[in-house]
Every structure is written in C-alpha cells, then in structure tokens.
Amino acid sequence: MSALLDRLPPVRGRLEAAAPLAPWAWMRVGGPAEALFRPADIADLQAFLQALPNDIPVLPVGVASNLLIRDGGVAGVVIRLGGVLKQVRTEGTTVIAEAGALDRSVAMAAAQAGITGLEFFVGIPGTIGGAVRMNAGAFGGETKDRLVSIKALDRAGRLHEAPAASLDLRYRHSALPPDWIVVEAIFAGEPGDPTTLKARMADIKAERAAAQPISVATGGSTFKNPPGQSAWRLIDAAGCRGLRRGGAMVAEKHCNFLINTGDATADDLETLGETVRERVLATSGIALDWEIKRVGHALREMSS
C-alpha cells in the first residue's frame, strides 16, 4: 500500500494505488494516478470528500475522452466517475443523468422515451459531467440548450444545486467553480417520435464516422474554434495535416484531431499540438486555444 492510500478515508467503492490510466484513456497515453477512486455511488463520493485531508488534490474524470494525461502521471486522487455514476432515467420529457453517464447513453435513453432535443449527444464522446463543465456541443446542439439544473459536490463534500442560468454557459465554457464535481444533470426535452429520433441519431453517427477519425486512439477536437473561424481550416492552411512527432500525428481525415499511431507518448502529442499552434500563429496571426485538457506532470518536470 502507498503512503497516500494510508491517508485516505474508508470507502464502499474501489481504491487503487499507482493505478494505470493510459489503458482506458482515449489517447492511450499517460502515467499512473497516485490513487484511483471509483465511488460506489454519489453518497460514497460525498463521504469520501468530507473526510479527505485538505492537502490531497483530486481530479474527477469521466472516460478521459477530452484529456491528455501527461507521462509523469497525476498526483493525489483521480476520481473516476465514468462507468460508475452512470444512471439515466426519464420522467415525462425530462432526462436525469448522473455525471458518469455517457453522452450517447443520454441521447439513446431520451430517444427510447420519445424525448427530442438531445439527439446531438450521440455524436459527442465523453460523459455528462464533462459535457456540463465545457458546454459540449456538436451537430447543431449544445449542452446549454437543454440543461435545466445540476447537482455538484465541492471539495469539502458539500452538495450544491444550481440552475443552468447561473452557470454562464457559452462556447466550451462554464462558470462552474473549479472544485465542483458535477454529479447529476437534469435536461428538458420535448415530445418526439422514437423512430424518427433513432433515425436522426443514426444520421449523426454516420456523419461523425465520415468526418472524424473515430477508429483510432484519439480524443475530441484538440483546439477550440476561434470566433468566426474553424480550427481545422487554420491547421490545414498552416500545412499541418499529417504532421508527425514521434508516434503522434495530426489526423489526415480531420486535422483538428491528434492521433496516437501506436507508440506515442503524451509528450509527443503535447509537443505536436504546440507545434501546430506555432505554425497557425505564424501563418494566420491567430493563437489557437487548447480544447483538450492537459493534466498531470511531464516526466521532464519530475526529473528536473
């Protein structure tokens, strides 16, 4: 047992020391978590946070579809919500989803119940907690369009309920406090025909498969679209399509995606991303902002 595990409170879920993160991260890179916690339920997570020493950092993750975990790993406790807090239920035209529910599961549950307005979620990789924090959107819809309210736990385990209007949801932005962990989201839809909704979702999945490199180790869009611009067009114009660094490559199919071709490190991917930013700035004068969240420590930081 690690020294950190000895300092952690008892849980009903699972705690693991030096837990590998790369095998389930979408990029398939990154070092281990000092400790990984998979809570049994929301009450288990709340009790854990209430008893956790204040000096131990926490990082909540869903399925790491929009994360680049650095090679040195993550200090403190990584709280994995994906695959655990994944319940989705419907009431009339309302959908209530736990934070670890896959976005596509929410879309499918809504369609099955004859609720329209959430079909776009079927084309977004990741979980609802991350979708709320970054106001995820695609295929003509955004999280803010249907979000009613959320429940979240802060670092001390206090439960907060907040209406969507208080979150200042904008393009890839929310005003959620950094220490809040979303645990539940409520969405409002409208009555719809399940057959029509499923056909629309099939179209979205086909469109995504045709435009994005979904069958390789990658994440979501790497960079945010600047106002009035498309990041991929700027990257393409800068001559970066197919650009490589080690085992990392700018996707040929959609050049706002970085690919792990098989043996990339997180450093390869991050360095390649920074090279893309430099070339876009040089050719267009526009500084791209990362959409993928980079977490953890680089190996060079740990050795310096």
Image (cartoon, helix red, strand yellow):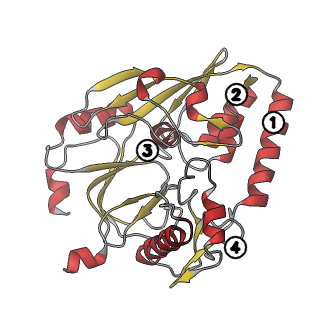
Residue drawn at x 51%, y 61% is 286
Report whether 19 appears left or right of 209.
Answer: left
User: Which badge, 2 or 4, comes first in the chain's sequence?
Assistant: 2
Report whether 90 appears left or right of 101.
Answer: right
Residue drawn at x 68%, y 46% is 123
State how far apart marks 1 and 2 are (Cα).
Answer: 12 Å
Q: Which mark is residue 81?
A: 3
Q: Nearer the viewer, mark 2 or mark 3?
A: 2
Q: Which mark is residue 252?
A: 4
Q: Which mark is residue 117?
A: 2
Q: Quadrant of the N terminus?
A: bottom left
Q: Nearer the viewer, mark 3 or mark 4?
A: 4
User: Which badge, 1 or 2, comes first in the chain's sequence?
Assistant: 2
Image: 257 above or below 10: below
Q: Amino acid at mark 1?
A: Lys
Residue drawn at x 53%, y 53% is 224
User: Which badge, 4 or 1, comes first in the chain's sequence?
Assistant: 1
User: Which badge, 3 or 1, comes first in the chain's sequence?
Assistant: 3
Q: Amino acid at mark 4?
A: Glu
Q: Which element is circle 3 on? A: loop
Q: Amino acid at mark 3?
A: Leu
State how far apart marks 3 and 4 are (Cα).
Answer: 32 Å
Report the residue marked by disc 1: 198
Q: Which element is circle 2 on? A: loop
Q: Which element is circle 4 on? A: loop
How many C-alpha atoms fall within 10 Å of the one at disc 1: few (<14), some, or many (≥20)? some
Q: Nearer the viewer, mark 4 or mark 1?
A: 4
Report whether 100 appears left or right of 45.
Answer: right
Q: Which of the 4 image quarters holds residue 138? A: top right
131 or 221, which lies in front? 221
